[in-house]
Amino acid sequence: MIRTIVAALILIAPSAVASAATCGGAHPVITAVAIKSVDTAGALNHYQIGGTVVNAGSDPQASNVLQSVDIYQGDQKLDTKSIPPLKAGESYTFTYVAQRSSDAGKGTTKLTFQLDPSPGSENCGGGSDKYALSF
């Protein structure tokens, strides 16, 4: 029984290492999204939201890369923010202004920020292509 388990692990281990090794190149990820400030005008609150996208990969993106972050509330797409090509380790901060009633309860609004990467960018998993913010 133990020999069978060890044999199975030996067969699985190389494929796991191989798939991890293929996750090089450019790898844009959303690392943070947060409310930066809130302004009130009449019955509306204006939430200034800032988000950061980082190329966590080992290679720069090509200069002609087209990529963006799509902003959703539920299934409804509210906006798209363009993200320029990033060098390895470089970050870019985008901003978005959300409006809602000043009477709205805390945590009742949820926005999802979805990275729409360029073709050829690696998706290394970990859910870092999506970020949810409730306020």
Image (cartoon, rainbow, N blue to C red):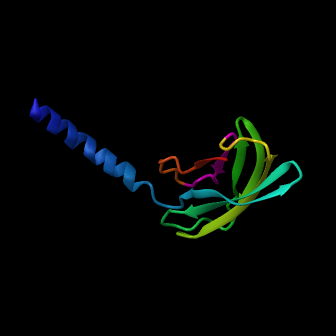
Position above or below: 30 against 58? above
Q: Return the x and y of residue 73 as percentages of the image width and height.
A: 72, 40
Is 129 colored magenta in this rendering? no
* Quarter holding residue 29: bottom right
What are the residue bounds of the magenta stretch? 108-121
Q: Residue at x 58, y 54 (%)?
A: 120
Residue positioned 38% across, 49% down in the render: 19
Residue name at image x 79 percent, y 43 percent: 103
Q: Which residue occupies 61% across, 61% down? A: 53
Quadrant including the N terminus: top left
Q: Position of residue 132 (x, y in %)?
A: 61, 46
Determine whether, in the image, residue 46 is placed left or right of residue 7.
Answer: right
Examine the rendering and report whether any part of residue 86 can be seen: no
Please say if 63 is above or below 135: below
User: Which one is nearer the viewer's eye here, 128 or 36?
Assistant: 36
Q: How many numbered badges does the structure rendering display?
A: 0
Quarter of the figure with residue 60: bottom right
- Percent x, y for residue 36? 69, 62
* Residue extending farthest top: 1
| Residue 88 seen in this snapshot | yes
102 sits to left or right of 19: right
* Quadrant position of residue 94: bottom right
Q: Is residue 111 magenta?
A: yes
Q: Nearer the viewer, residue 116 or 126?
A: 126
- Determine the residue located farthest toward the right in the rendered image: 42
